[in-house]
């Protein structure tokens, strides 16, 4: 099992890598300028967070050209929405915050995770409108699209940072993503 983490200059990308490694996955933190051809043999990708949609390198190509499960974290979630025709804009509350997220749709990504969890958010922007072909999986009082997934492909996005200590059930979420990648 090989799942790579795309480094988008985010402060927590190394924690995603560490979480996957600790779960027994062959993983590597790779630059977002890595050519698509060098990622053809992975079983899944995590599109990590970062400071700006303008600094996501080849991530749009990865989303369009690679046929593997992917999960976008924070900026990766926003980029996924934008690439597939959704809208991203300023959130009602920026910066760092503890957020209560409600799971509103059953999905294998949230298998074994309670319907309400406390997570750590660190963002200024958010997905404002779902792309066509995606469905909302989670919401909060400050963000209506906390998580989403493509209706037919294994493409997921979460606005929060499951890899940080403050987020409840983050390891379980990554474990569930690994199981999705095994299919």
Image: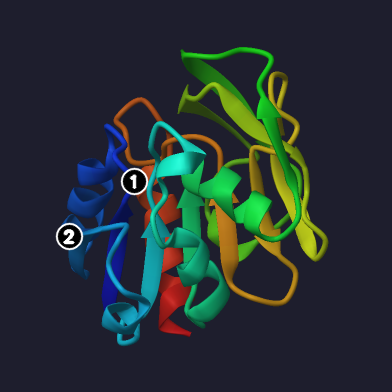
Can you give x and y, in whole percent of width and height, for residue 154 in the image?
A: 58, 72
Mark 2 or 1: in front is: 1
Residue 35 in the figure: left or right of residue 67: left
Can you give x and y, in whole percent of width and height, for residue 161 in the image?
A: 42, 36
Which disc number belongs to residue 21? 2
Q: State the CA–CA distance, disc 2 to disc 1.
A: 19 Å
Q: Is residue 35 above or below residue 57?
A: below
Disc 2 residue crowd, few under 14, some 14–19, many 20+, Cα 10 Å:
some
Can you give x and y, in whole percent of width and height, for residue 168 in the image?
A: 43, 33
Can residue 28 be seen at all in this image of the molecule?
Answer: yes
Residue found 29% across the figure and 30% down from its top = 165
Residue found 58% across the figure and 59% down from its top = 156
Residue 88 in the figure: left or right of residue 28: right
Can residue 111 be seen at all in this image of the molecule?
Answer: no
**Image colouring:** rainbow
**Residue bearing the label numbered 1:** 8
Which of 102 and 34 lies nearest the eye of the viewer?
A: 34
Q: Earlier in the sequence, mark 2 or mark 1?
A: 1
Image quadrant in which you'd find residue 111: bottom right
Which of 11 and 53 lies nearest the eye of the viewer?
A: 53
Q: Secondary structure at mark 2?
A: helix
Q: Quadrant of the N terminus?
A: bottom left
Q: Is residue 152 above or below residue 73?
A: below
Disc 1 residue crowd, few under 14, some 14–19, many 20+, Cα 10 Å:
many
Which of 131 and 145 lies nearest the eye of the viewer?
A: 131
Residue found 55% across the figure and 20% down from its top = 99
Residue 95 in the figure: left or right of residue 20: right
């Amino acid at each position: 099992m090989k799942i790579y983490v795309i480094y988008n200059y985010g402060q927590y990308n190394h924690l995603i890598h560490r979480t996957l490694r600790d779960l027994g996955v062959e993983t590597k933190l790779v630059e977002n300028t890595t050519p698509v051809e060098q990622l053809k043999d992975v079983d899944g990708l995590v599109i990590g967070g970062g400071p700006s949609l303008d600094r996501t390198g080849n991530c749009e190509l990865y989303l369009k050209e690679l046929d593997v499960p992917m999960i976008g974290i924070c900026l990766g979630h926003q980029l996924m929405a934008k690439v597939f025709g959704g809208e991203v804009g300023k959130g009602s509350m920026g910066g760092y915050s503890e957020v209560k997220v409600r799971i509103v749709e059953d999905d294998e990504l949230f298998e074994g995770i309670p319907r309400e969890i406390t997570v750590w958010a660190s963002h200024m922007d958010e997905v404002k409108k779902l792309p066509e072909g995606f469905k909302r999986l989670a919401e909060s009082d400050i963000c209506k699209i906390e998580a989403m997934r493509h209706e037919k492909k294994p493409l997921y996005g979460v606005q929060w940072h499951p890899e940080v200590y403050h987020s409840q059930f983050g390891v379980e979420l990554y474990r569930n993503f690994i199981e999705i990648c095994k299919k």
